[in-house]
Image (cartoon, rainbow, N blue to C red):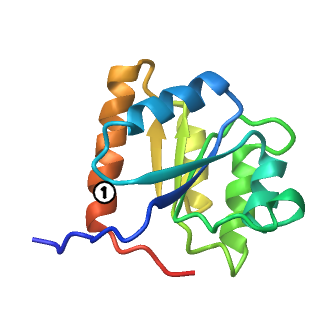
Amino acid sequence: MPETRKQTRPIEILMVEDSPDDVELTKESLKGAKMSFKLNVAEDGVEAMDYLKREGRFADAARPDLVLLDLKLPKKDGHEVLREIKQDKDLRRIPVIVLTTSKNEDDVTRAYDEYANCYVVKPMDLIQLIGVAKWLEDWLTVVKLPKE
């Protein structure tokens, strides 16, 4: 049995999502978690890269332990963001979970070709999203995340 992770600080999550409703559902789904999470949000792909590179108003942003990435984003789509993250030597080790409504096989294949760590189709309601949040929490208790 894998050793479980002792939590010493909140898990920093960057959620890249342009839908305020999906952000609120995600926040709600994480409320019952045993682990402590800090959910930061970027509303488009350009903002996400500014956050990750700590540029502009994000100069003091915490480095995320995990990125939840939607594919359908304004300004720069999720595939572009994923590709930039995985090509950047300072960012590539951050796990990226694609969390999107797209069930398109081309999107799935492309995301894994761009080194996504996981591809999850967004649930349509809070109950299903709580299940995804529980899975995420379980996953985070057993994985070893890289240090900055």
Q: Residue furthest right?
A: 56
Residue 99 appears at what percent x and percent y? 52, 40
Q: Residue furthest left?
A: 1
**Closest to the observer, 119 or 139:** 139
Looking at the image, residue 120 lies above or below residue 57: above
Looking at the image, residue 114 lies above or below residue 70: below
- In percent of the image, x 75 and y 64: which residue is there? 84
Q: Quadrant of the C terminus?
A: bottom right
Residue 28's image quarter? Answer: top left
- In percent of the image, x 70 and y 49: which residue is there? 79
Residue 19 appears at what percent x and percent y? 67, 27
Q: Quadrant of the N terminus?
A: bottom left
Left or right side of 98 for 142: left
What SS does tag 1 mark? helix
Marks counted in the figure total 1
Q: Which residue is mark 1?
A: 139
Looking at the image, residue 64 lies above or below residue 18: below
Left or right side of 57 for 128: left
Residue 110 appears at what percent x and percent y? 61, 50
**Closest to the observer, 30 or 88:** 30
**Closest to the observer, 8 or 138:** 8
Residue type beneath disc 1? Trp
Task: Tell me if mark 1 has few (under 14), some (14-19) or many (20+) residues whose alpha carbon lies within 10 angstroms of its own.
Answer: few
Left or right side of 137 for 77: right
Residue 10 appears at what percent x and percent y? 44, 60
- In percent of the image, x 56 and y 32: which residue is there? 104
- In percent of the image, x 78 and y 41: which residue is there? 44
